[in-house]
Image (cartoon, rainbow, N blue to C red):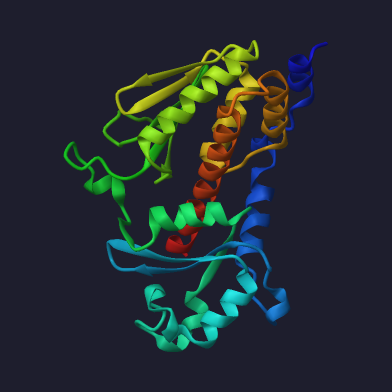
Amino acid sequence: MDEIEFLVSETFKHFNENFVQHEDATREENEFQFNDETSLPEEPGILYHVQKATSVFVIRTFVSTNIRKDYLTIIDSPEDYPSLRLLEGNADDVAGKLKFFLVENQSQAEIIHDQLHNRRFPINEEMICNISDPGFSWWLTKKLCGFQLAFTMSVASDENTVKLGPLGDKELALKNFQALEALVTSAGIDMNIQNETNRVQFTDCEEFILEELKDVFEFGVVTETLTDLFKLLAKKVKTNSDLQTTWFYLQEVAAMRRFWIQIQYDINN
């Protein structure tokens, strides 16, 4: 049995079998009600405030290298952080407005901040999108032998389509998807990523790889199996700098997706 076959045979308890448990644990971690300052994590992340109106919301973000330190500093002197707009509306509920989201490293926090800070988003995006304004979200559609990522809502969807939110620049995505296809095929694994107008199709690959990649976009999860796959690719393409770039890109997209899942939870609760 070669390494690819071993990966296939050892993979699965697939994420769909335990997503609810993972989601609850993540939500509990990020929404913990603090009894004292020692409850706050000393890890990098995003401190943020969602301002919600009738039809739109705005995300105010702050990049933190230490959630505990920065949270307590901001709560103590919110007037020193006007970009978070914590004193607008009910100025007595600053602690209730300021939330946090953990990331693996500061770079991921900076990417989220760069893409989302001070941006205005419609609450019901689907109701206002049209050909001239196709919206900001990516969309994932599950297929019989793979999945499709669409960068605008103008691409036809069905009941198998999931709105992913704003996951980044289309051209950067296409560049990394092309690199991913080249890396996987260079290791002797079939993969076909078709670039079409405003969408890409992921097909003709080992089913477990497609599932792992789909989970990155749908749930914001980089599984141990996908990590093992990249370790295997590193052994086979040691001199290819695209490997590290693509790996970091998938982690950044996953972080963005997890953050957007949390934002949607905040908006709806």
Residue 216: percent from left, percent from top? 56, 37
Q: Given the current orientation, which residue lies at the most extreme front position?
A: 239
Which of the two residues, 132 or 13, is positioned nearer the viewer here? 132
Task: Using the rendered view, name the quadrant where residue 64 is placed.
Answer: bottom right
Compared with residue 242, is residue 42 higher up or lower down, i.e. above or below?
A: below
In the displayed structure, 227 sits above or below 47; it is above
Q: Mark yes or no: residue 147 visible.
A: no
In the rendered image, residue 148, in percent from the top left (x then y), is placed at 43, 26
Q: Residue at x 71, y 31 (%)?
A: 225
Q: Residue at x 38, y 20 (%)?
A: 195
For the image, the number of numbered tags is 0
Residue 40 vertical placement versus 221 (above, below)? below
Query: Which residue is more in the foreground, 190 or 32?
Result: 190
Q: Residue at x 49, y 87 (%)?
A: 77
Indicate the position of residue 193 as horizontal and vertical percent values: 46, 19
Q: Using the rendered view, name the quadrant where residue 69 is placed.
A: bottom right
Q: Nearer the viewer, residue 102 or 13?
A: 102
Q: In the image, 8: left or right of 255?
A: right
Q: Is residue 134 visible?
A: yes
Q: Quadrant of the N terminus?
A: top right
265, above or below 152, in the image: below
Left or right placement of residue 256 versus residue 1 in this view: left
* Residue drawn at point x = 28 percent, y = 66 percent: 54
In the rendered image, residue 68, in percent from the top left (x then y), is placed at 64, 74
- The outermost residue toward the right is 1
